[in-house]
Amino acid sequence: MTSSQIIVLATPLFLALIALEWAVGVARGRNTYRLADAISSIGLGALSQVSGVLVRVFAIGLYTLAYEHVALVRLPASALWVWLAALVGYDLCYYAYHRAGHRVAVLWAAHAVHHQSEDYNLSTALRQTSSGFLFGWLFYLPLAVLGVPPPVFAAVALIDLLYQYWVHTEQIGRLGWFDRWFCAPSNHRVHHAVNDRYLDRNYGGILIVWDRLFGTFVEEDASEPCVYGTRTPLRSWNPLWANLQVYGELALDSWRARSWADKLRVWLAAPGWRPADVAARWPKPAFDLTRVERYDPPLARRAAWAAALLFVAMLAASLLFLWNAHRLDGWQTAGGVLGIGALLWAIAALTTPRPARAALRAADRPLV
């Protein structure tokens, strides 16, 4: 069974848990869902999976190539200890990759997609980038050098990803001793927050002990609620722009910079860094948590129903595509990705009324 088929089989459980979380939130008077935001997040997850079919051979292929040519040993795939060691090793590599994704601008350009939602719920977990394949594979090469077989690597990667689904919720509070060792909802809420106290913390995937060891752990403080999103807000439901927003901003600053060194540094510096000459000529307002306002354009009932029905069609098409992806040739795969992308674009158009778009162009206040 392929990894894409496993995702297809897991999808009904994902959706059932989303429905359960929504129902619990409504019953508690703490509903964390908005229709357009949830559709956007799930849609970006679908786009990530279907576009990943085009590039998955790239990442696994490079890992396999490294394993075949530079592995110091060949660990037995049948040994339980290899699987456990590979899972822990993968989680450490994920910590390094995740941390770099918040500290290096070009890596943040991919990872920012996951943080763009201003809500925090299980649909946010599905909100994934479509460009992470560009550099992510580099961080897992140590496992190939140490001799972790490619099938084991692929399996533990999927386990690590699936684990992280349940921690994206506000409906589960502190979990005592579990919070001290593992990534749990409280720890990961901190990671998604833009508050100064919480910014760029708690990178662990399964284990939170990496953050405790390397000094990046912060506990959630009940006196300072988490504010979610990014400090340069997306303010759009468009899935293409969600994936390209930060790349576009970096490319523009790089183009405008006078110094060739600054043109390169824009991509490698910390997110938010800008060349002095560019910042002087094209200033951006400083982030101010007190001026936070969620992107929430009005959504007419008819548009909501149309978007929901189109979303169901998109989801069905995505699942059908993923289940049969291993049987498709290159042209069929590309056509499927483009078709699903077009459905997502149409959904975004329905959930962003024209008056809201005009208001966005006129607005000059920073939002989170």
Image: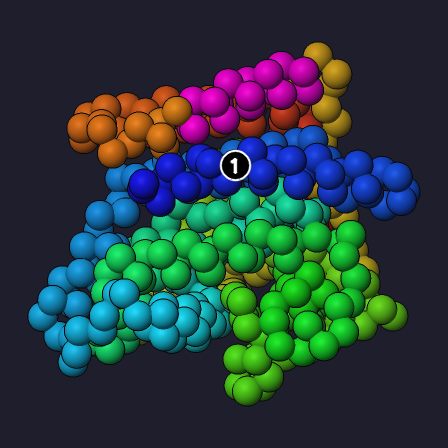
User: Picture quarter containing residue 301?
Assistant: top right
Q: Which residues are magenta?
A: 304-319
- How many marks can you see? 1
Q: Position of residue 329 (x, y in %)?
A: 18, 28
Residue at (64, 46) in percent of width and height: 122
Quarter of the figure with the N terminus: top left
Asked whether residue 34 is drawn in magenta, I would say no
Helix, strand or loop for disc 1: helix
- 51 relative to 250, above or below: above
Chief SS of the magenta region: helix
Whether residue 6 sits left or right of residue 145 in the image: it is: right
Q: Residue at x 46, y 60 (%)?
A: 160
Residue sitting at x 75%, y 62%: 226
For residue 13, say whether it is visible: yes
Q: Nearer the viewer, residue 127 or 273?
A: 127
Query: Looking at the rendering, which quadrant does residue 199 occupy?
Result: bottom right
The residue beneath circle 1 is: 11
* Residue 54: quarter of image: top left
Q: How is the image coloured?
A: rainbow
Residue 59 x %, y %: 25, 55
Residue at 22% in and 27% down: 328
Verify whether residue 311 appears in magenta.
yes
Can the viewer see residue 361 in this picture? no
Give the residue type that dot 1 points to: Thr
Vertical placement of residue 158 versus 313, above or below = below
